[in-house]
Amino acid sequence: MNARISPENIKKFETSYKVGLVSTIEANGVPHISLLSTLMAKSDRELMLGKFICGESKENVLREPKAGFLIMSLEKEFWMGKMTYTHTLTNGEDYELYNRQPLYRYNTYFGIDSVYYFDLLGISESRKLDMAGIVANSLRVSLLRGRFKRKLPQKAMKHWAYELMQKMGTLAFISFIDTDGYPTLVPCIQLQAADENTLVLSSSPYKTELAAIPAGARVAVFGANLKFESVLLKGVFSGFKGGVSTVEIDRVYNSMPPKHGYIFG
């Protein structure tokens, strides 16, 4: 990982029209993923994000400052990294910068009420989504997922979330706590639901990154469609066998406004 953000990438991160994901750590040690498109670079060694809606991620970093992030552009270029929360401001030039952006400037109800700052620990080189690999592995998962289907009396995912996570092409990302104690985010768009309690994913593409997830780890999976309707799922990662793993879901978090919070588990 790089210790600095390049000037070119600082410029690319300025737009609000991107996927910005931040993974934080809950009090119970489980990763939590939030969609925060306000995430951008303050400098080559510092990132910041604007608080637009109250959610668990902002509370988490106040208690445990270690965080992971993933930024993906509309051109399907993405970066993964880690950062450490340092402080919050409720005024100043960055506060004004956020609230001058069209998305917040013309919001009738509320804008950005505070800015959270993070020191960069490391950031990856930019990569393009491996669309050929994603399509091939999505087809593989689609063929295999029936083997993992179970009929349990209690269903973790409601029908809408289940349908979302069954579809090929749903944007999916998985987070786990790395050996350094920081959350890590990895794309896993090939992931699909086998049933309302089970997710299935292959180890490819991004085999190296996904191989770092230990069997039995508690993970978080964020799924969203192109309208950015989303759901956050948490559960136990089985580990890869034959290049395939499952996540057994035991908690579901509503990640969409107007009210965030757990709806199962």
Image (cartoon, grey):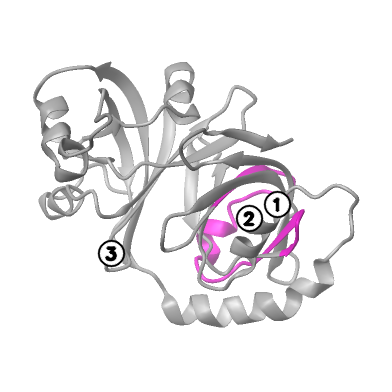
Q: Please provide the residue range marked out in magenta.
A: 194-222
Q: Is residue 103 above or below residue 111?
A: below
Residue found at x 28% / y 40%:
39
Q: Where is residue 12 in the image (x, y as percent from the top left)?
A: 17, 54
| Spatial separation of the CA atoms under disc 1 and disc 2 | 6 Å
Quarter assignment of residue 107: top left
At 89% from the left and 53% from the top, the residue drawn is 152
The amino acid pointed to by label 2 is Ala
- Label 3 sits on what residue type? Leu
Question: How far from the left and from the top, in percent, is residue 138?
Answer: 59, 76
Asked whether the viewer can see residue 43, the reply is no
The question of residue 33 being in magenta is answered with: no
In front: 168, or 8? 168
Q: State the residue in front, 257 or 114.
A: 257
Q: Distance between the residues labelled 3 and 1?
A: 29 Å
Q: Which residue is under mark 2?
A: 161
Q: What element carries label 2?
A: helix
The mark lying in front, picked from 3 and 2, is 2
- Judging by the rendered image, the residue that carries numbered circle 3 is 74
The crowding category of the residue bearing disc 3, from other C-alpha atoms within 10 Å (few below 14, some 14 to 19, many at least 20), is few
Q: Mark 1 points at which residue?
A: 158
Amino acid residing under circle 1: Lys
What residue appears at the point 39 percent right and 43 percent down from the top-left corner?
Answer: 69
Image position of 136 (left or right of 228): right
Instruction: Determine contact: label 1, label 2, CB under 8 Å.
Output: yes
Any magenta on residue 215? yes
Q: What element carries label 1?
A: loop
